Image (cartoon, rainbow, N blue to C red):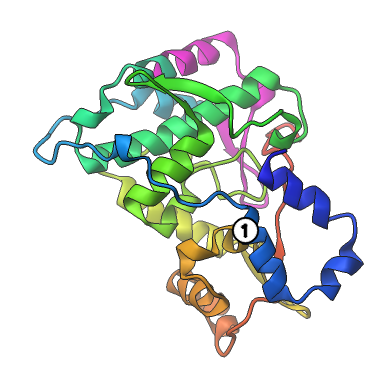
Amino acid sequence: MNWKHFSTTLLRPAKFAVLAIPLMGFMFFESALAPKADLWPRWMTFNPASKETIDHTLWDRFLKASVKKDGNGINRVDYGHIDNTRKAALSDYLDKMGKTPISRYGRNEQRAYWINFYNALTVRLIVKEYPLGSIRDIEMPWDQKLAEVEGQPLSLNDIEHRILRPIWSDPRLHYAVNCASVGCPNLLPVAFTGRNTSQLLELAAHGYINHPRGVRITDDGLIVSKIYGWFSEDFGGNDKSVIAHLRQYAEPALLDALQGRDAINDYEYDWGLNDAGS
């Protein structure tokens, strides 16, 4: 069973039991189930002198045609209306990425490549299995070997937890990779490139933290996405460090509301499919 599916199905049915567990223990439990950043040395190779760029035009066009923002500020994908032309373009793009000798490129190009590759593979997986209500309806979606690069089969977990997270050690990457869920940071309607990635990471972090599914304050206290529990170590490892991260991107109203807070009161996540038709 996938760790995310396990944590949700175990905890959600017995809310009263969860409330009986100290929140710190709950966060530790969630974090313990999440994949750790586990460097795959095979992908450390890069060419610091390389000036070559990777063309992500096909993916960029697909995103612009397929991603729609709803009235709540959540980017959704029109999975049910992706025609054969767009499916072919997506397959062509992934085929091209699979044949890219990524180890020959510079670090910035590699980072954009792996983010786009992850997101495009996720979208193709959903399109293949559609209709469905959640990515968790697919058996082991994050562990399937969905592509091959430089002769090496890769899964989504490989890309996120063995390449992106350990190599770049940047918590903003959690705002870039999209798991096809409403609770996830938005799938941006533009492809990452070696040049725009830093800007897009900032934009994505700001957008998620200032949206209720990322951070909200209620009568029950500070409620944040489970991303900050699952991957607490990437945000400093404790409530104070997570809140310090949130403050970096909080707009004035949220920043004021975060003043004086040093503890998280609860975590939430919506695994519903980010489907434009739902």
Name which residue lies at 20% across and 32% down: 105
As for residue 38 lying within the magenta part, the answer is no
The C terminus, quarter of image: top right
Q: Tell me residue 109's x, y (percent).
A: 26, 37
Quarter location, residue 248: bottom left
Q: Residue furthest toward the bottom?
A: 260
The N terminus, quarter of image: top right
Name which residue lies at 45% across and 69% down: 249
Quarter location, residue 271: top right
Q: Tell me residue 275's x, y (percent).
A: 69, 34
Name which residue lies at 65% across and 76% down: 264
Residue 131 vs residue 45, the one in the foreground: 45
Q: Amino acid at mark 1?
A: Ala
The part of the chain drawn in magenta is: 66-93
Name which residue lies at 70% across and 72% down: 25
Instruction: Find disc 1 in the rendering and name its residue.
Output: 32
As for residue 75 lying within the magenta part, the answer is yes
Secondary element under disc 1, as helix, strand or loop, is: helix
Q: Tell me residue 144's x, y (percent).
A: 58, 26
Residue 99, above or below 29: above
Instruction: Specify few, some or many for label 1: CA neighbours under 10 Å numbering under 14, 14-19, or 20 or more.
Output: some
The mark total stands at 1
Specify whether residue 214 is in view: no
Specify whether residue 107 is in view: yes
Q: Tell me residue 3's x, y (percent).
A: 67, 46
Residue 266 vs residue 208, the one in the foreground: 266
Residue 47 vs residue 195, the one in the foreground: 47
